[in-house]
Amino acid sequence: MYATTLIQHGGNIPGFSAHFSLVPSTGFGWFGSRTLTTSSCLSPRRSPFPFRRTAQSDTSIPPGVEPDPSLFPAYAGSYEDPSGIGPVTVTANGATLSIDIPSFDVNGTPYVPVLVPATLDNFVLTVNGEPINLTFIADSTGAYVWIRTRITVAHRIAIDGG
């Protein structure tokens, strides 16, 4: 076994998965994509190449970007995505941040309403059993006015705590 640098990037949104890998020393790379319902385009049983992880990735959160529950009330409020999912309400209750998405409820789209903190301003929203990164974005005054995911961008319409 030889030590080789492997650069990878991938992501999933509901209904689609993509993955890119590159071995810089060889100039060889590959891209995979697929429509899906529950699994990624890259998994050990589907990969045409015998990838084997040789070192454990560091999954610790770097200092200074840890989730900060004291900010949860600043994220809370009513948001709107007029071109996509419509109104969204974010509610803070102590160390828990929740999201209500009426259009998902009406359409029977399953989602977990509790947002899981990942790093500062970043959370995981689970939709159809798939994790989706959700980010709160502040304006130049420091007020959180945007929610961004791969499937939606919503703008705050009221700072009301939900």
Image (cartoon, rainbow, N blue to C red):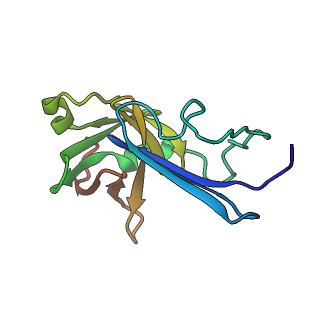
- All told, the count of numbered labels is 0
As drawn, 130 above or below 49: above
Picture coordinates of residue 38 (x, y %)? 39, 30
Identify which residue, 137 or 70, lies in the foreground: 137
Q: Is residue 35 visible?
A: yes
Q: Which quadrant, please, contains the C terminus?
A: top left
Q: Is residue 27 left or right of residue 108?
A: right
Residue at the (34%, 32%) spot, across then down: 37
Picture coordinates of residue 40 (x, y %)? 47, 37
Which quarter of the figure has residue 34? top left
Q: Which quadrant, please, contains the N terminus?
A: top right
Picture coordinates of residue 8 (x, y %)? 61, 53
Q: Is residue 17 visible?
A: no
Residue at the (46%, 43%) spot, across then down: 123
Identify which residue, 78 or 81, lies in the foreground: 81
The residue most toward the front is 48
Q: Is residue 26 left or right of residue 77?
A: right
The residue most toward the bottom is 140
As drawn, 30 above or below 53: below
Picture coordinates of residue 9 (x, y %)? 56, 54
As drawn, 26 above or below 91: below
Residue at the (48%, 40%) spot, across then down: 41
Residue at the (71%, 54%) spot, across then down: 6
Which quarter of the figure has residue 96? top left
Identify which residue, 17 or 27, lies in the foreground: 27
Q: Is residue 133 left or right of residue 78?
A: right
